[in-house]
Image (cartoon, rainbow, N blue to C red):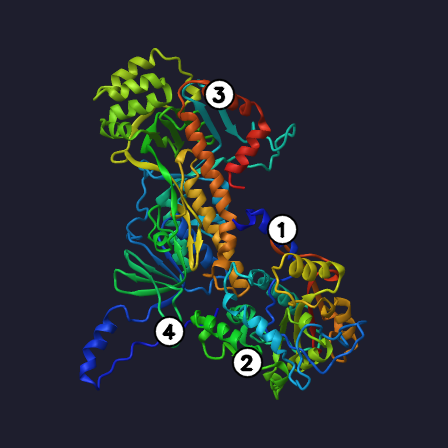
Amino acid sequence: MPPRLQLSPVFRVHTLPSQISCRRSYASSSATSPEIYDVVCVGGGPAGLSLLTALRSSKLTSNLRIALIEAQDLQKNRLRDPSPDAYSNRCSSLTPGSVRNLQEIGAWSYIHASRVQPYQEMQVWDGITDSRISFDWTSASPLPFTPRKLSQPTTIATMVENTNLTTALLARLSSLGGVDIFSPTKVSSIELGSQTPDVDLSSWPILTLSDGKSLAARLLVGADGANSPVRTFADIQSRGFDYNRHGVVASLKLSGPGWGGPDHKTAYQRFLPTGPIAMLPLPGNMATLVWSTTPERAAKLKSLSANDFIAMVNAGFRLSAVDLEYLHTLPSGQEEEVAWREHHTPIKEKDIPMKVVHVQENTVASFPLRMRHADTYTGERIALVGDAAHTIHPLAGQGLNQGQADAAALTRTISAAVATGQDIGSLLALEPYNDEQYAANNAMLGICDKLHRLYSVESGPLVGLRSLGLSAVDSMGWVKGLLMGRAAGG
Amino acid sequence: MAGRNPSKLVLKLQTFTARPQCQCASVLRVASHRATSTTSPILVRHSSTTAYHPPQQTSSVDPTEVSHFNALASSWWDPHGPSRLLHLMNPLRHTFISRCLDTPALPNDPPLPSRLRYLDVGCGGGIFAESAARLATTDSVIAIDPSAEVLKIAQGHQRRDPALMAPGRLTYKNIPIEKLPVGPSEAEKYDIVALWEVLEHVNSPGPFLEHLMPHVKPGGWLVLSTIARTWTSWAVTNVMAEDVLGIVPKGTHDWKKYVNENELRDWFDRKEGWGQNGAMKVMGVMYVPGLGWKEVPGGEGWGNYFFGVRKDA
């Protein structure tokens, strides 16, 4: 790597009294020379941390001077004294591709292994017609009429708490060292630099931090979430819409570890007209809920007592859409109402998740669902990763995985640029990153959006067609193999 | 996505060997060497038909060619400008140099230093010079070009990267190669002397190359890229790109001046002290729309290619 240049400090004139105050005020404002960095990453979420860890763990990019700026206290958000009966309500389903990448950058060994849960089966069904598709690697074959190979994976995806992941990434990052971490520190402003006789920083973003420091970025990475200030600075539009749906999450305890025991776990998702309800397995009897529903119903669910809430979640997997609609109109007493209705509804218990028996305190929460896609992921000295680039419907659990794939792709692009002496912030050097990720993410955003729309329909020919589709795919092992391969991230 | 536009696709397809703009602002022409034979342009050149040569001219620099590249100066660093294909080709130059440096030396040869000295002849706006100067394995880069105006662009762009402003890292010089003093000691010569997209614009490639060769350190490499003189390249660069589509200014390329890979090879084979022990490398490349520049085995026979030869230690 080329040597870093420390800009000369502002020259102060002491001999002419009339000029002192002027010079001093100049020097005390933004005139202090910015620190020059190769990569400044704003945002210490999974995507940003994964990017920096990858850059630090590769010899080729280990000479880059890197800064991380995170508004929240990264130390505070670490997983501490984890109890096996308490889980964060923000969990993600990591594809085998994401896990492989985390292994490659050396972060996976820092994960609290007892708190992750791989699952081997996925049950998805239509809440209106009960038409069902089940995914597992045994019934999915790679090609028509070929038996499954023993070397094929058995894991569909791995559930992990987001804090477990970020804690592991941070641990790996600090073992690698070499990143200047500013946390908790806010970005006060971003503006383009200026020209001096020595150097022309007019294309470099200069970040002023809340602690007064000033950083110049050869490459400014926006890993700063859906409302990305970096994206705003770069004048990159993000287009999309709100689904008028909220995702209700909660950490739950079930009556058992699942129908397949602790070694064969299943994820369940039922498409209701208001959105899908999903129960994803965690270790032991624990599970995490993601229920996409209208904002009004989300508010109702959050207002219920623990027992009524539990009853509603159990009903969400068992009762009809009509029953559910009625149950949401009751101010309280869902527990008794659901118990009575369950007796009159035919239920195959082994096709659905085991009953919820407990909801962990303070874990029922909701967030609005959006679909957003930035017009581009790159600009001159700018790259966007993760939610700053795209926000997706959570129904396929792809959001965090897309961010991990972004980080891996951007790492490849930066490495190639370093190897051939390109300026890693130049638009031309960043082009491969945009080419690699944009179309792939756009397709996934589109698929999840279409699925959401398809299953929002309650009646009419579409309902019959979608059931036919699910049943057809379910009986064709090789189509499932194809779909699962895509979902597995490689 | 520009690549989605069908008309642009066609343009790219037609220009895959044309390089719409030459990086060689330093189109150095040795005016004194003129002959009418075209048998092998490496030895003697067909007279240039369009360029203006004052009879008394003694410098190798053709003022017509220099002004041609001056006009392109301002767009040199525009990633979507006329130099885009050159920008995209630049990483391959480093790939090729790495391949040359990996060629095993003779058992008694001293190893190359861990940090290399580069001379970039005809550096233009500095696309290669900047990239070479950023490499961790680089000691210094001297980049020369006869056009002062193009060098102004290069130096202006250099100031945009503090890493390139470290003293001695990257130095531009407005000087033709024959006036560049040869380092008095071997250590002051260069490990890599690069000549990118220049040779096809030179009237007398042989004498021109002889100006470069003394600057190469024993054990160092002379690397170049150019284009083969074939019917394909004639049709694409002269007829299609210049006459039909007009995407390359007329007169940019004189097909008769293109040099074939086997001509270069034969020429260096006859040179004492060059390319021993298989230290002559070639790599054919081609621009594929949507994929970029790709290595094409055997492509040196009919299109763009890289050529490298080591000075015996």
Task: Measure the C-alpha gap from mark 4 to mark 3.
Answer: 65 Å
Residue under mark 4: which chain is it in? Answer: A
Q: Which of these two is toward me, B165 or A311?
A: B165
Q: Amino acid at mark 4?
A: Gln
Q: Are marks 4 and 3 in contact (CB under 8 Å)?
A: no
Residue under mark 2: which chain is it in? Answer: B
- Which residue is drawn at the image coordinates 52% and 29% (left, top)? A136
Q: Which mark is residue B10?
A: 1
Residue A20: where, in percent of width, then height?
20, 80
Residue A13: where, in percent of width, then height?
24, 82
Side of B214 relative to A286 (left or right): right
Residue A105: where, in percent of width, then height?
48, 52
Reply above or below: A264 against A386: above
Q: Are marks 1 and 2 in contact (CB under 8 Å)?
A: no
Per the image, the residue denoted by label 2 is: B174
Q: Earlier in the sequence, mark 4 or mark 3?
A: 4
Residue A402: where, in percent of width, then height?
45, 44
Task: Measure the C-alpha gap from mark 4 to mark 1.
Answer: 48 Å
- Tags 3 and 1 on a common chain: no
Q: Amino acid at mark 1?
A: Val
- Tags 3 and 2 on a common chain: no
Q: Residues within 10 Å of mark 1 (few under 14, many from 20)?
A: few
Q: Which mark is residue A6?
A: 4
Q: Which mark is residue A467?
A: 3
Task: Measure the C-alpha gap from mark 3 to mark 1.
Answer: 45 Å
